[in-house]
Image (cartoon, coloured by chain):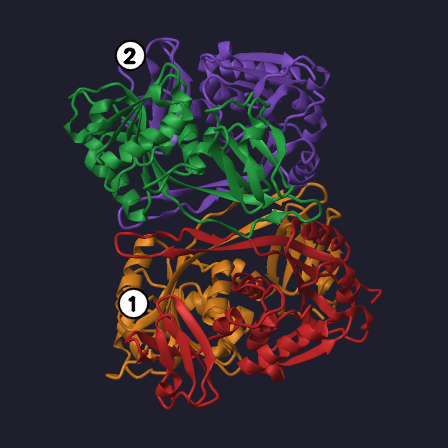
Chain colours: A orange, B red, C purple, D green
Amino acid sequence: MISEGDYVIFFYGKKKWLTKVEKGKKIHTHIGIINVDNIIGKPYGISLETNKGKIVYALKPTIYDFIMKMDRLTQIVYPKDLGYIVARTGLSSGDKVIEIGTGSGALTTFLASIVKPTGHVYTYDINEEFVSIARKNITKVGLEEYVTFNIKDVRDIYDIRDADLIIVDLAEPWTVIDFVKRALKESKMMVSICPTMNQAERLSKELKKGFIDIECDEILVREIEAREGMTRPVFRMVAHTAYLVFARRLYDDSR
Amino acid sequence: MISEGDYVIFFYGKKKWLTKVEKGKKIHTHIGIINVDNIIGKPYGISLETNKGKIVYALKPTIYDFIMKMDRLTQIVYPKDLGYIVARTGLSSGDKVIEIGTGSGALTTFLASIVKPTGHVYTYDINEEFVSIARKNITKVGLEEYVTFNIKDVRDIYDIRDADLIIVDLAEPWTVIDFVKRALKESKMMVSICPTMNQAERLSKELKKGFIDIECDEILVREIEAREGMTRPVFRMVAHTAYLVFARRLYDDSR
Amino acid sequence: MISEGDYVIFFYGKKKWLTKVEKGKKIHTHIGIINVDNIIGKPYGISLETNKGKIVYALKPTIYDFIMKMDRLTQIVYPKDLGYIVARTGLSSGDKVIEIGTGSGALTTFLASIVKPTGHVYTYDINEEFVSIARKNITKVGLEEYVTFNIKDVRDIYDIRDADLIIVDLAEPWTVIDFVKRALKESKMMVSICPTMNQAERLSKELKKGFIDIECDEILVREIEAREGMTRPVFRMVAHTAYLVFARRLYDDSR
Amino acid sequence: MISEGDYVIFFYGKKKWLTKVEKGKKIHTHIGIINVDNIIGKPYGISLETNKGKIVYALKPTIYDFIMKMDRLTQIVYPKDLGYIVARTGLSSGDKVIEIGTGSGALTTFLASIVKPTGHVYTYDINEEFVSIARKNITKVGLEEYVTFNIKDVRDIYDIRDADLIIVDLAEPWTVIDFVKRALKESKMMVSICPTMNQAERLSKELKKGFIDIECDEILVREIEAREGMTRPVFRMVAHTAYLVFARRLYDDSR
């Protein structure tokens, strides 16, 4: 049942509105006003009418919906990349993850949804404003208990040694390789999100010492309009977000 | 520490061998013989020499490694598709998932690694041989307690009503839509893995009654050879595995 | 030297304006007014200033520029597809080409630029308005002498037997297969531009009788922003225009 | 009619054999022996039987067929790239083209087929062996009269000023920019075939002085298996050949 304080997502065709359920709230859209009162106490998936007679549906938002509608000061990591990070690294429920570069918290949210309830995400950023936005975003989704926010430069940290996965979302990822070597468990993976070829190239080179299974991938998603007798891809798509550089830490007996 | 009975993956360049650690075991490769005894009691990530003097590394296999090296009688779902299924549906630890079409268990394994420890995967197939292989594959990974195997046609099941996600990997996915409507929670998602355009088209059409947010996507992964001064994509890539059709179940007051 | 009556293309960054050179003409743009008089009698490639002090360049338009800036009532065939049609069919200067579906004349123009001066393009459309626009477009480029326009249904034509290439840009390309068989030289190619999978599928099937080397391709172009230290693909791209179906006509002794 | 000395291409399914027609010639294949005598005096597109009873077809090879079956010492330029070069630069019959880096002559052949009969291709390479192979390849196709081969470093050439298009297929394309500026007509295009990102990046940077409309593109072709009720892309594809860098020469009053 939908209650006050819940988040819902309203659907009309391909258009979606994410909103918090509050008494008396009205959402003004191009298809008319959605009266939020009409769904309180109703089951998810219910339909309602706008004042212009258009039918919209009220659904429970997924992590994907929350991420796509997140407040952001920075470029978020896209679902296509989030998914491949999980699949390629084998991230599992229970894992301890370190994220370097909290940004707007899209990746943080997604990671927390996977590693909970026994795993945890430790996220680091040196920008207070980003962390503040990210914290709000994650609280909205209800996953804040699985995340520890740190406003700190990881290069000053020497006491973590047991991360299952480290994710680097920095402009100069090679500057934290020493930290990754200290903090990541032997044989576990790191991944870096690199917007440019030059970053991917330099990082791959610098990982050659101490890492193996170094791989750089790009992920493309193309939507297909599957309509009877008229099936074809959509006309425009995202051509690029970032390259993903994966690497696995070797044992180091000097550690 | 690596013990007898563990699985390890040996690396040499881009080449990988997955093996169970057993005393006296020797692996014959094009770069010489790997003597498994040499790694027992050693830490993961350690290097060792083949009898031809080549250095290989012994790492702890990830879910990805297990999936890529799985015994298979059927086409497996590829990591690129596994990852996007998780990211697009928002599958989280704790979810109850139904998989229709167990196949070789690659997807089953991946799903179990995400939903554990409080969630569960219920997988269905009518082919006993497939289920037997899948069960062996999952046991290897150690995730069998999070999976229930069923040799059964889901069309005969009427008592499940609370799935968080249903995944359909069948040649004629539209034949199980009625089951999906019965078994899936309101507002939750289903996804179908469709090798051909024709399947995606027909399924999308038949989902129009009772579902919303119907989306068909294809995922492409391209590897980049990131080498200093010579960075470029690899020369060949996988051009197609399957289309993914996503849909969200609406509320149905006749239910 | 640029003379009155010539066409020029003005460049500013990624922005382009195609215009006919006329005395006293002024082009109003977001970077100020371009005074066309300033380039008359000057060499192509010359720079000039707008009244806001921005530097623009006046270049001789290529066929590509003309096509991209063409007046159009219909979807044009994109350069990526034009190019592959020429490369895959081996269209050469001197060839006799039949185009079924003149549309806005983009493809017609491109074909004429290749087959001239000894080859010719015979283009057919049943829509007078399209033909009128296409004729204007080609005249602008100066290639009208290499094209014969016909407002006619090719299914009524029985006396052509010597086409080197036939290009079909119709919603139901299979309806003209009999004409293609009559008009195309033995062993020569036809190609059809099919926006949907369903068209490509049906056409491929119907070509199986009488044709060989049937191939369906899609072409993607991705632009790369090659900038020092920051090279990466652009963020958005065209995801789809059409499938190209190629086939080669077999000898038919009943002909 | 097929005569002695002609080239034909034999088709069987997706398999093709290119051969010169000679009396008594027999081609040994996995589907049996093809007796070339059987097609002499017959029309192109005719079918014949191998000694194992398989039906093959004898077709007239296209430029595409010749290129794909060319003897090669170097990586050839692929049809997908050849086509886009023509479409993006607007190369037309009658143009004067300079090719720097003859290689195996695939691009040379294609260019000649477009610019003939009044245009010409001047191709330069410093490797005699390459030029010798390229010359043989073009002679096979019958286009040698439209090509002048030069074993020469273009950096030593100062007397050409009227090229309509210059194509650079060198490992260090920026080393010939001064020649391009000298030899290319104002406002005309050059294109360079760059296997790596690093080449594309450096060249794009060095072209900023003296050129405009600098664009870097990559072209992908994906084949679709269009079969009734089972249409889908093929499973594997070419992921990369080269980046194409285009640029247009500005007017230079010091010239």
- Residue appearing at x 33%, y 53% in the figure: A197
Q: Position of residue D239 (x, y in %)?
A: 44, 49
Q: Nearer the viewer, residue B42 or A199?
A: B42
As measured in the structure, the alpha-carbon distance from the residue carrying label 1 to the one carrying label 2 is: 56 Å
Which residue bears the numbered disc 2?
C1
Residue C60: mark: none
At x 73%, y 16%, the residue is: C156
Q: Are marks 1 and 2 on the same chain?
A: no
Q: Residue at x 37, y 43 (%)?
A: D242
Report the amino acid beneath label 1. Answer: Leu
Say if residue B69 shows up in the picture.
yes
Mark 1, secondary structure of its residue: loop
User: Percent position (x, y) of residue C103?
Assistant: 60, 22
Q: Relative to the observer, which residue lies in front, B27 or B99?
A: B27
Q: Is residue D46 above or below residue B167?
A: above
Which of the two marks, 1 or 2, is nearer to us in this view? 1
Q: Which residue is mark 1?
A: A207
Which chain is home to disc 1?
Answer: A
Q: Where's the C terminus of chain B, which quadrant?
A: bottom right
Which corner quadrant of the image does residue D174 belong to? top left
**D57 shown above or below B245:** above
- Residue under mark 2: which chain is it in? C
Q: Furthest-right residue in view?
A: B254
Quadrant in the rendering for residue D177: top left
Instruction: Specify the farthest residue to the front.
Output: D24
In the rendered image, residue A116, in percent from the top left (x then y), is placed at 52, 78
